[in-house]
Image (tube, rainbow, N blue to C red):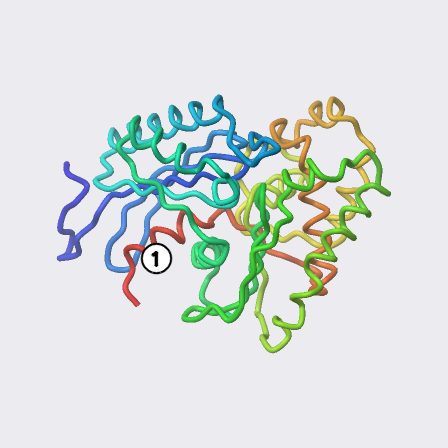
């Protein structure tokens, strides 16, 4: 059966969005029609493009080829699953890369896909559109290279900023081996947030939403459940105490010790405390006692932005 078909006179299109993040490559396959999006499959590969940037800001040759191969594999999977259109975009790491044009060429040669590199403002907009639920909301999206903070409602983004304080970026800048080290990272994040705080003051929010691997990983950690058990992750409420307790436990542990924890994703064990430090700084700065974890983000936002009418 063709995914594009008329059902009660509504045309349904199967499509895919592939996002090259700083810490991972992700794909969403979805059916869209009449301003509705049905998620049909989600995929992830732990590519750390930001970590592959050298001192000159170039993506390593190994990562260029690895990314090209994985994107081609994702594109084939999307076609095999019936996708009629495939969209490809990149965020902070590729935005920073001096040789992004080389990555674009390799991707096109291997998959036939054209790469769209999103600005920081666009990245913030897409994450907000994908994660929020229509009520006046704040959103924090902690990525590998940057963190986006947005306030808005169903119709309008009131204010948003993309800050250079992703979990991988700060991992490379400021090592953490103790709670005291983590506090220094929190203070550093505060210096980046502080100049923008007054821009958010005029806007009231009903809820705050958290997007990205820091949030989903911490939700599993707090519940002491296997990290690959996805039940009760989306919609889980993290408190400020949860975040500080996780920092207190994880910051003094070695990487090897963290990797033995069944409720902590091994691939994120090295950067999780940096992500938690960013989150703690955000919650302190905006005086948040709680934040709702979302498994949705810029992939959903990209498709909504592309296919949904105003």
Q: Position of residue 35 (x, y in %)?
A: 29, 59
Q: Which quarter shows the C terminus? A: bottom left
Report the label total.
1
In the foreground, 65 or 230? 65
Mark 1: few/some/many CA within 10 Å (<14, 14-19, 20+): some
Q: Nearer the viewer, residue 205 or 159?
A: 159
* Furthest residue toward front: 56
In the picture, residue 193 is in which quadrant? bottom right
Question: Depth check: 291 or 93 in front?
Answer: 93
In the picture, measured across the screen, residue 252 lies left or right of residue 221, that is: right
Horizontal arrangement in the rendering, residue 287 relative to residue 69 (left or right): right
Find residue 257 and report its horizontal and vertical position in percent: 76, 24
Judge from the rendering whether residue 211 lies leftward or rightward of residue 67; answer left or right: right
255 versus 246 height, above or below: above
In the image, farthest residue toward the bottom: 202
Kindly indicate the quadrant of the structure image that contains residue 80: top left
Residue 158: x percent and y percent?
51, 71
Q: Quadrant of residue 85?
A: top left
Query: Which residue is more in the foreground, 273 or 56?
Result: 56
- At mark 1, the secondary structure is helix
Q: Residue at x 66, y 52 (%)?
A: 238
Name which residue lies at 14% across and 36% down.
Answer: 1
Residue projecting furthest to the right: 180
Question: Which residue occupies 30% across, 56% down?
Answer: 36
For disc 1, the marked residue is 305
- Relative to 266, does residue 15 appear above or below in the rendering? below
């Amino acid at each position: 059966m063709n995914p594009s078909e008329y059902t009660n006179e509504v045309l349904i299109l199967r499509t895919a969005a592939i996002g090259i993040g700083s810490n991972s490559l992700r794909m969403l396959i979805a059916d869209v029609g009449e301003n509705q999006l049905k998620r049909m499959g989600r995929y992830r590969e732990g590519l750390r493009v930001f970590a592959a940037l050298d001192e000159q800001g170039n993506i390593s040759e190994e990562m260029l080829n690895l990314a090209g191969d994985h994107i081609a594999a994702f594109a084939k999977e999307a076609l095999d699953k019936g996708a009629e259109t495939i969209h490809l975009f990149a965020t902070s790491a590729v935005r920073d890369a001096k040789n992004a044009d080389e990555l674009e060429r390799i991707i096109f040669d291997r998959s036939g896909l054209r790469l769209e590199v999103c600005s920081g403002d666009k990245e913030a907009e897409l994450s907000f559109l994908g994660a929020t639920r229509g009520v006046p909301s704040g959103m924090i999206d902690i990525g590998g290279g940057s963190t986006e903070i947005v306030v808005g409602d169903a119709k309008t983004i009131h204010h948003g900023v993309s800050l250079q304080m992703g979990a991988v970026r700060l991992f490379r800048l400021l090592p953490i081996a103790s709670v005291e080290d983590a506090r220094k990272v929190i203070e550093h994040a505060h210096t980046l947030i502080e100049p923008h705080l007054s821009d958010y003051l005029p806007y009231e929010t009903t809820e705050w939403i958290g997007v990205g691997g820091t949030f989903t990983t911490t939700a599993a950690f707090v519940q002491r459940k296997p990290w690959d058990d996805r039940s009760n992750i989306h919609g889980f409420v993290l408190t400020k105490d949860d975040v500080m307790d996780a920092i207190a436990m994880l910051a003094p542990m070695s990487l090897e010790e963290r990797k033995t924890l069944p409720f902590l994703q091994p691939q994120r064990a090295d950067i999780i405390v940096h992500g938690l430090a960013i989150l703690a700084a955000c919650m302190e700065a905006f005086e948040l006692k709680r934040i709702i974890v979302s498994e949705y983000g810029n992939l959903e936002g990209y498709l909504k932005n592309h296919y949904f009418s105003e």
